[in-house]
Image (cartoon, rainbow, N blue to C red):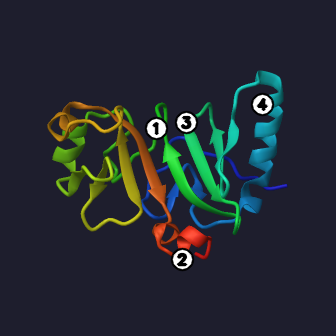
Amino acid sequence: MTDLRLKIDAPIVPNQSLGGLSLRTSIISIQDLVMELQTEYLISERKLFSLPSPFEAKYKFKDEKITVCVDVRNGKIYQLTALPGYEGLLFDRIYVGMKVSDAMSLEPNLYYDEAMEIIRCKGCLGLAIDTNEIDPPPKLVPQMLIQAINVYAEEAFTPAGNRGQW
């Protein structure tokens, strides 16, 4: 049994970690946490784990403040998401719930990628920031709130990664 504990105040590090968990690690490393979710599910009947696509398992931890996505083909964590209530910071100053314009003024490399409908950071791999609306008009994005901060293993989204070979 591992002594791994999630931390809702851990720094958010693109292409690396969030919540005290690291990308690219095996689901075996969080096996005890997943088993705790099963017990919590049986008691609360809240949907805390799912299989949103044939090759993606998704787990919700810490009262749904942290989401962990695992590629079931290789068993590795490929994405970690901070949701409302998460207290850790991206770049030591950006947080979930912050106004996008405030985040952009603190980090000038942030920009809205209209094609992907996410906020990205120039020169920074493995980071996607979501607003609280789907497909918003670009001119309204700065006034929106950051709904989620995602860090991901950038190689998981390559042609080989799409086949589980990363």
- CA distance separating discs 1 and 4: 24 Å
Q: Which residue appears at 46% of the width and 32% of the height?
A: 84
Q: Which residue appears at 37% of the width and 42% of the height?
A: 130
Q: Residues within 10 Å of mark 1 (few under 14, many from 20)?
A: some
Residue 19 at what x, y percent from top left?
55, 49
- CA distance separating discs 2 and 3: 30 Å
Mark nearer the N terminus (4 vs 2): 4
Residue 78 at what x, y percent from top left?
57, 61
Give the side of residue 31 with respect to residue 9, left or right.
right
User: In the image shown, does 72 or 100 lie closer to the viewer?
Assistant: 72
- CA distance separating discs 1 and 3: 9 Å
Q: Residues within 10 Å of mark 3 (few under 14, many from 20)?
A: some
Mark 3 secondary-structure assignment: loop
Mark 2 secondary-structure assignment: loop
User: In the image shown, does 88 or 159 lie closer to the viewer?
Assistant: 159
Q: Which residue is mark 3?
A: 65
Q: Are marks 4 and 2 in contact (CB under 8 Å)?
A: no
Mark nearer the N terminus (2 vs 3): 3
Mark nearer the N terminus (1 vs 2): 1
Mark nearer the N terminus (1 vs 3): 3
Camera-nearest label, 1 or 3: 3
Q: Which residue is mark 1?
A: 87
Which disc is residue 160 wearing?
2
Q: Amino acid at mark 1?
A: Glu
Q: Which residue is mark 4?
A: 41
Give the side of residue 46 with respect to residue 11, left or right.
right
Q: Residues within 10 Å of mark 4 (few under 14, many from 20)?
A: some
Q: Amino acid at mark 4?
A: Tyr
- CA distance separating discs 4 and 2: 34 Å
